[in-house]
Image (tube, grey):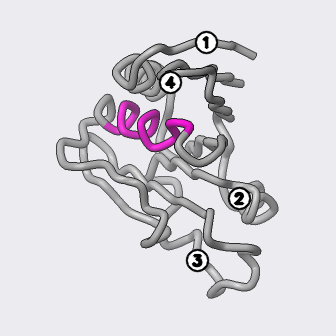
Amino acid sequence: MRRVQTSTAAETEALGAEVAEGLDLGDVVLVEGEMGAGKTTFVRGASRALGVQGPVTSPTFTVGQRYHGQVTVAHLDLFRIEQLDAEEPGFLVDYLGPDVIGFVEWPAAGSEELLALARIAVRVRIEHAGEDKRIVEIE
């Protein structure tokens, strides 16, 4: 496990970009942390490194978004879903697969389905550390 402290949003984005460099198609990154911890900031940095040019915003209310860059990037936020098995069957298949690199915020709701469907490449945990500082654990 790697533990890093970031002091700005730009540093958190840069860490996301660094993680993205080691990802392959079909990989999924699970991103955990409390509300406002910087999960989407981390995903934004990773997405930029993967060639996404447009806005990368939290998909909390849309649940999922797909961005197109050098590869297709799927960005899911399962915060509003209590249990993924209560959703439409195949919900994750619409976003994740062998031709996509995926990022899943609040993955606990779909942990079993994610493990069955996707190759979990990296787990990221982000915590507030006062002011703009964050502690980011990567495994």
Residue assigned mark 1: 4
Q: Secondary structure at mark 1?
A: strand
Say which quarter of the image contains residue 34: top right
Residue reaching furthest to the front: 131
Q: Closest to the observer: 90 or 58?
A: 58
Q: Amino acid at mark 3?
A: Phe
Q: Are marks 4 and 2 in contact (CB under 8 Å)?
A: no
- Density class for disc 2 (Cα within 10 Å; few <14, some 14-19, many ≥20) is many
Residue reaching furthest to the left: 53
Against 68, is 6 above or below? above
Quote the CA–CA distance across marks 3 and 2: 11 Å
- Density class for disc 1 (Cα within 10 Å; few <14, some 14-19, many ≥20) is few
- The image's mark for residue 66 is none
Quote the CA–CA distance across marks 4 and 1: 12 Å
Residue assigned mark 4: 19
Residue assigned mark 2: 114
- Density class for disc 4 (Cα within 10 Å; few <14, some 14-19, many ≥20) is some
* Chain-order first, disc 3 or disc 2: 3
